[in-house]
Amino acid sequence: MKVSKPFLIILLLLLAFPAVTYAEQGNGNLSALVVYSDKDQEVNYNQRYLDMLITHFTTDIEFIHESEFLPAMLEGKSHLFYQGITDDSLSSEFRDAVQTFDGSVVALGANVKELGERFSFVEPIGEVDYKEMYLTSAPDEKISSELETINVKTDAEVLAEASDRQRNYPLITKHEDSYYIGNTYIESKFSILVGEVLHDVFDTAHNDDVNRGYIRLEDVHPKVDHERLKQVADLLIERDLPFMIAVIPVYTDSETGDKYHMSDYPKVLEVLEYMQKNGGSVVMHGYTHQYRSSETGEGFEFWDVEHDSPIYQAPDDNKKLKKEKHFEDPADYEAYKQEITAFETGYIKDKLETGINELNGFGLKPLAFEAPHYTISQNGYQVVSGYFNTFVGQAQTTDDNWEVMGAPPYMSHPTFMNGMTMYPETLGFVQPENEDAVDDIIEKAEEYLILRDGMISFFYHPYLGPERLEELLDRFEELPAIDWIDLKEENTKTESSEVVITAAEGTVKADGPPLSSVASSSITFNHFVKGMADKATWLLVGTSSLAVLFFSSYTLLSRRRTEKEGRSEDLG
Amino acid sequence: MANVFLYTSLFLIWFMLFYHMFLMQGGYIFSQNYKKTARKWREKPHRFPTVSILIPAHNEEMVIEKTLQSMIALEYPKNNLEVIVINDNSSDRTGEILETYAARFPFIKPVHTSPPNGGKGKSGALNNGLKEATGEMIVVYDADNTPEPEAIQYLALGLENDPEAGAVVGKFRVTNAQKNLLTRLINIETITFQWLAQAGRWFWFRMSTIPGTNFAIRRSILERLGGWDEKALSEDTELSFRVYELGYHIRFFPMAVTWEQEPEKLKVWWKQRTRWARGNEYVIFKYLFRFHKLKRKKMAIDLFYFLFTYLLFFSGILISHSIFVLNLFFDLNITIGFVSYVLLILGFLLFVTEVTLALSFERGQLTWRNFFTVLLMYITYSQMWLVLVVYASWLELKRVLFKQEVTWYKTQRFEGESDKAADNKAKVR
């Protein structure tokens, strides 16, 4: 069961401006510069949230702290974003650049007064609490969200409003090609409105009628109840819904430390193969979904929760990790960081390599990756991108705190994911103890449907059995039709040293030396041999049954003949 | 781990069963056609080559007379026939009876031997007989055999019509099949052995094994081979291999029939079979290690078959039996499941159908009584073979390790009757 994913933090921002596009309708060269005022010089989670929103439109994006801004950085940019996280005075170079920049400018949060004439269309007048928000173009489609925002006085066009159910406040305002987004703290749902407005900012319509979405069956490890898994799968198969299966190849018993592989539970494997054949796509959900001694599905695999750090040491080590202050010479600290990062890289590579080969060796084709508990470091994304081009779930956005994570409201290509396509999970999951879980998901889905290409995605634990999923699916049928994603149609690519698995147009291809995945570990090899042996035994059954049949009929024929010959000999 | 053993044993066993299926199929086809061949050969003009029949006899007073009478009854031109009975160091009335007959029938020629030249075993006796033999064709009978009158004629036809045949092997049948359960089982076994292994191998590979009795071999070949190997533990399997090595095949021709008695007591059976098993093991190791030197690689089929029977198939059965028993007491985490029961049943059905098919080729053998004996055979007689192989292998091992001399001449007598059985029938199954 997944602990926390949503604890989102806050995004600030949104803005947008042009560069190269990833958008379906490429309109010119969209290229964005993000200038931010934040406590760190380095890019942190605030910028990464913005990254996830902007890379829905373009991956040509650069980040620069306001203090390091140079006007030359705007050369060739189509869009300028200013993200004001901390209160700060801005340099005159930047202020001047904002005035003269001839593309769209989007400002978020603090310091709007510092942005000069171009943003004089808003005047901040203190913070207000609100309970819901909506696009002014669709005031009835409200999104509930208890946050605060900077209230502004403005005569400009208001694109989105917040309301405390008594008064309304402008949330997103626009004057010509300048946008102001007053919310300093952007929680994931606010991104729905921001995301919608960004389509205007980037002048990219994305007018598909149908929202995309996905259903993911979560934490399917070797010891799941195969009957329930099958029931849940059949429910989806009967309704002809494609789905994802988040598979954990190895189950670790936290008490005994015993490890169980899919080959130890052939029934589960059989169901998985059946699911894969009937609309299911395998998503590799880690290799063991645990680190140190925790139980599979409960533990973290790519995060050391005890130290709240990336995996910088072997599970049985428990050293205190050193901080910068422990080093006199910064060069020593750098060397230390490189060393522990190299350890992490090796650790993750090993898990991914083994996991992909093992799944493939069992005939399961992982088309995407989902980090256990959505936790993984920034370096982790780099490593994963060497194996997968498709990432499912939410994104941890800082290496300082695993709880800082979130997802964009639509698909995107976050730059920190190094080229992977992100299929965000937006709606959460059916929590067994929450009786209103289905209502909650549907309510949230309605909110994401406000966004023209908002993602409608959730996950479900098969151990719950099919009932609640059925209820949920029934409720979804009352909503506008959703295009449920089939990863096999999505041009995914998964690559280990033994195999390259690609999916396109509904077919999955695995290229690699024959049997190399099978031979990559004794577990898959034994399983393969057993499978062949099993087939061979049935071949024996078939052939020998025929032989029994033939010999019996020969016997009857031969006996008749022998007795006939005998009689004629007697006579003759 | 148990699974690995189980599958290994399963495939070893089933490899053997498939080979038997294959042989049985050949045996069936052959059984439907050999009479036509015989008729064709009989109908066309042919000559009667000179034949020397060799009968080694060591203390055979109980049976020799009957054997000699069957020789007299042979339908073969007597001027082309000589019957050389080697009275090998007998201490009973064998020699006396022999002389009586020799006096009356000139084509019966007694050879009396005594140490140091005689009394050295069957091979020695045969070699002594061979020295006296003048025929182009040498035929061997055990002293307790009563061949059917046409037997020699058919053996001669086989050699005459098949220049590539170095030897022709006839069929033997059991006279005392109805005596008790043991002889009934042996009877079923010998019929199956001959139709499955002998006829099947002949059909597919032009191979069959020379038994101790009722076969004809060209004298020229025996001379090239220097007679019988007096050191070989089972002189006839050994002889077969040497005939192949010269490039000849050995024809199975069941038109030539002889009748013989089989052991009526388990103890006797046990001794006889132990000897065969040891003999075959001897041959395996003798030829396995010089296989690269052999000119005719065809022997690999038989060598491999023996190797399989005595080593691999046998191990397979032992392992699978052990797993079965162990699994009753411990959870071996066997994953094979349902299919193993199906295979168990099919293995049994194959056995039953193969044996009944072989019985159906012999008139009057496919009876309900025999059918039920077959069912019983699977769980009794066939299983005894396991213990036997263990025992024989142990004796062979001891012989090799301690360089023991083997001494045997023939199976012990009982009830005043010969229990001599045809030597060197390879074990069926």
Image (tube, rainbow, N blue to C red):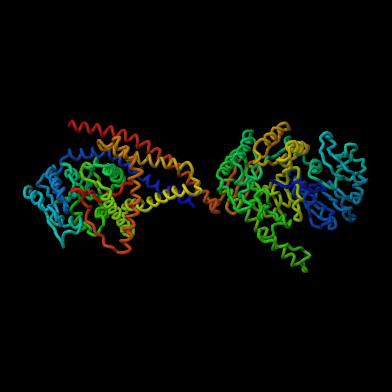
The percent position of residue B65, horizontal first and vertical second, equals: 13, 47
- Pick whichever, B237 or A420, lies toward us: B237
The percent position of residue B363, horizontal first and vertical second, equals: 25, 36
Identify which residue is drawn at 85% across, 51% down. Answer: A84
Task: Name the side, left or right, on which A495 lies relative to B47.
Answer: right
Q: Is A240 situated above or below A314?
A: above
Can residue A173 be seen by looking at this rendering?
Answer: no
Q: Quadrant of residue B238?
A: bottom left
- Pick whichever, A302 or A394, lies toward us: A302
The percent position of residue A88, horizontal first and vertical second, equals: 89, 54
Instruction: Give the number of callouts.
Output: 0
Can residue B186 be seen by looking at this rendering?
Answer: yes
The percent position of residue A498, horizontal first and vertical second, equals: 57, 53
In which quadrant is the N terminus of chain A drawn? top right
Q: Give the residue furthest to the left.
A: B103
Task: Name the side, left or right, on which A208 lies relative to B55.
Answer: right
